[in-house]
Amino acid sequence: LSFLQERLRYMLVLLLLLHGTDSFYVPGVAPINFHHNDPVEIKAVKLTSSRTQLPYEYYSLPFCQPTKITYKAENLGEVLRGDRIVNTPFQVSMNMEKKCEVLCNFPNKPVTLTVEQSKLIAERIREDYYVHLIADNLPVATRLEFYSSREEEEKKKEKDVQFEHGYRLGFMDGNKFYLHNHLSFILYYHREDVEENQEPTYRVVRFEVIPQSIKLEDLKADEKSMCTLPEATGSAPQEIDPSKENQLLFTYSVHWEESDIKWASRWDTYLTMSDVQIHWFSIINSVVVVFFLSGILSMIIIRTLRKDIANYNKEDDIEDTMEESGWKLVHGDVFRPPQYPMILSSLLGSGIQLFCMILIVIFVAMLGMLSPSSRGALMTTACFLFMFMGVFGGFFAGRLYRTLKGHRWKKGAFCTATLYPGVVFGICFVLNCFIWGKHSSGAVPFPTMVALLCMWFGISLPLVYLGYYFGFRKQPYDNPVRTNQIPRQIPEQRWYMNKFVGILMAGILPFGAMFIELFFIFSAIWENQFYYLFGFLFLVFIILVVSCSQISIVMVYFQLCAEDYRWWWRTFLVSGGSAFYVLIYAIFYFVNKLDIVEFIPSLLYFGYTALMVLSFWLLTGTIGFYAAYMFVRKIYAAVKID
């Protein structure tokens, strides 16, 4: 153990040393040095579209194929994302220019697309598909230049440059389809410092493409696979007619440029955002609002409680004979176990599991260890962490179940290990069947599904049982007051004490604190953007925890003042009120931001949204429940009860 601690300490020191001024090398991703004329392999990842949400593998379309197709071994996260990384026939060498070269082996014999293939390409162009390639693990980007509309800059005509991930498969003009059959690759390299007599080494720091559509007749190819590009003005685009066979040539050119960008900062281009200021502004805004409201709520609650406790504890009060009112009245019932204690403790156990997983993932990602360059690492880490956090989920669920006078601990442990994961697996399996039907690479292959089931029943289930066993054996939570034999009658409640009104009221503050971040997360998931702002996300997560806890305490205080002691389930439901607003926002996002019209993409969107909402409800409900439980135990411990 001491050896392990020593190794970990050594790694941490190493990481700190590697940490630069504004960027650092991601652990596990080492730079590759190329010499002049070394081959730089270009691989294909997948085809994606934000209109269909169905990724396809590169060779699902009739692109030129190498003599031997080899797929890269992938981690769990890559498989779940639908990445299928495969080699391509592009021949690119370090710092070697290529004017124009034919991609397929027969330069004089153009590629003939059958009617079926032409139809498929036309359909993918209509569905707005993008092709994603990588060179030295760096994704290809298309440069978008547009003039800024600010008036004082009109004279200068300064161009704003933004990058689009991947390149468009083709474009439509009226009812005609045009395919981008010529790719102009622009690769940027950084020359590394070497000693005098050594050969210079280079590192790839940016990978851009300019896709073009050029008609077969305009591409003049010779026997050596070389071709001549036409003048920009006089060339016609390559049309794909879905009703007949089409002939075309796939060609490419390569241009190298030297760059000042260092290898460690090469991802900055892909992660540049035009609205970082909006982001900062919104985060600061929500921090200020939440802490301001938190301060007010805390002051009100503390002052009111002090007053209440002082009044309740006045033993020599003349009016002691008068009937008590408020939350002290229900002291004999406040810790009465609720209905369905097993299900409640199981859901809270899953909530704890989620909380630990999310906290660790965001924290590790914030340190830069799960950057987009480690493809699929985030999802793989999240899956494994959720499995291993089962021990904490089981422990908390077991202890709470014992506190709620439960006896069947084995059944409780099984319920904790299978209830939430079972729902997630069920929904994912149904959605996966639809994706399978579409032959998309987004479908989880059968072996991966079996591996996930083995992880669930081989890692998560035993760990939950282990945690549950120790939690159930541990002393139950110490409740400061005894529960009466006969339950007290609950007076009629006002309209605003209704569960649904409570959910609507309690959800506003936590949702308001995080909805800007939600926009960026949705963009990352549904519009193939990179999400990397984990520092912001960590801050938002802290704000979410604080606001959920406070709202939950306020709601439970009002409920107990109204002499309603059935707070267990209600607190769990009401604290998760912000999940309802997340659902409303998801519907708004679907209608306004996404261009999804077909049934299966819509089903996928709402299926995955349902999972997100359910997980978010479990997370916020658990945070709120434990805050309220601690609060209730604290206030009843502070009053003297005969």
Image: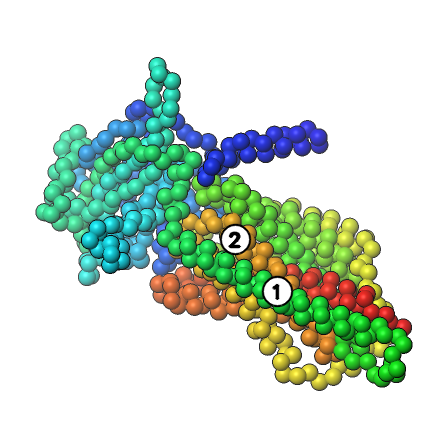
- Give coordinates of residue 552: x percent, y percent: 65, 67
Residue 542: image quadrant is bottom right
The quadrant of the image that shows the C terminus is bottom right
The quadrant of the image that shows the N terminus is top right
Left or right side of 530 for 158: left
Question: 417 or 255: nearer the eye?
Answer: 255
| Distance of label 2 from label 1 (alpha carbons) | 20 Å
Residue 294's disc is: 1
- Give coordinates of residue 159: x percent, y percent: 25, 50
Count of labels in the image = 2
Residue 537's disc is: 2
Q: Nearer the viewer, mark 2 or mark 1?
A: 1
Q: Residue furthest top?
A: 197
* Residue 213 is at least partly visible in this image: yes
- Give coordinates of residue 138: x percent, y percent: 38, 39
* Residue 614 is at least partly visible in this image: no
In the displayed structure, 540 sits above or below 131; it is: below
Name the residue rendered at 35%, 63% in the picture. 595
Question: What amino acid is labelled 1 in the image?
Answer: Ser
